[in-house]
Amino acid sequence: MTVPKSHPRYVSLKIRDKIVDGVEKGITSLHGLTAHGRGEAFDYLLGEKTMESAKRSIEAAAALLLLAKYPVISVNGNAAALTGKELVQLSKAIPAKLEVNIFHPSKQREIKIKIHLIKNGAKEVLLPQKNCIIEHLDSNRKYVNGGILKADVVFVPLEDGDRTKALVKNGKMVIVVDLNPMSRSAQKATITIVDNIVRAVPLIIKTIRRYKNSDKNKLRNILKGYKNEKMLMETMKIINKNLIKNMPQNFP
Ligand code: PTJ
């Protein structure tokens, strides 16, 4: 769709185009469209910009990814369509493995996501295997590969809540990007970045590059000072403030 640059919702509509494109290419599921709509609604409430609290979560996420022994980036249909190229860049910057993991089962879609990531510069992309299963999960997300199975830190952008909980139960630390601070993923993750994935991932890459050669103690201190619940609380306050600010003024 050609969106005129002058349109007040230009950026949002361009992001929406990427999801539609993902569906047309067979990368994103149809359900991904509704998931995106939910995200858009929360982004609207958050003012469609990266909040200070999200910036602090991004710092902590970068520190955790750099300290991890075996970090893995999990990629689903929405994340691939919105930030395929950037997730490949992130995997190289850390470095971390890329593993496809989708909720709505489709072997074909898994392969298309892999091809999409390879076209965007990935050297290796792991696919779920039927004989490789993580515990505490019944959905299609239970099928993993050597990456997620072995990982100590899993980066899970844009997710449904069950898996975050299951990954934590499996002893992993989980970094989530989710615009909804009330979602189960947001509430169960080790670090929750409440921001749009299209803004968050480039910022994580930038922060990783900035901290890449930092002393490990500096990174540990960033993590020590980080409290996920506090960030979620600050986010909720911003939503509250934005709701009040936008209330009709002259209502009797
Ligand atoms: O490709 P699949 O089969 O793995 O399916 C992927 C989706 C996203 C469809 C699947 O995981 C799903 O159904 O997710 P949910 O349960 O709808 O949760 C998605 C969460 O992501 C919601 O809390 C949304 O608010 C949030 N979200 C949507 N778009 C964005 C987002 N968060 C960050 N950035 C976005 N652009």
Image (cartoon, grey):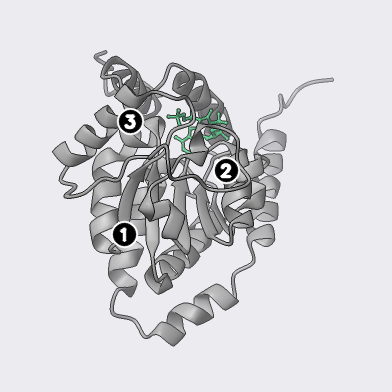
Q: Position of residue 40 (x, y in %)?
A: 51, 28
Measure the C-alpha gap from mark 2 to mark 3.
17 Å
Measure the C-alpha gap from mark 2 to mark 1.
20 Å
Q: Name the residue that disc number 1 marks.
A: 96
CB of mark 2 near ligand 1 (< 8 Å): no
Q: Is residue 138 left or right of residue 144?
A: right
Q: Name the residue that disc number 3 marks.
A: 110
Q: Secondary structure at mark 3?
A: helix
Q: Label 3 is placed on what type of residue?
A: Glu
Q: Position of residue 160 (x, y in %)?
A: 56, 36
Residue 137 found in image quarter: top right
Q: Name the residue that disc number 2 marks.
A: 163
Going from the N terminus, do you reach mark 1 or mark 3 first? Answer: 1
Q: Label 1 is placed on what type of residue?
A: Ala
Q: Residue at x 52, y 40 (%)?
A: 142
Q: Closer to the camera: disc 1 or disc 3?
A: 3
Looking at the rendering, in which quadrant would you find the N terminus? top left
Measure the C-alpha gap from mark 1 to mark 3.
19 Å
Total marks shown come to: 3
Q: Label 2 is placed on what type of residue?
A: Arg
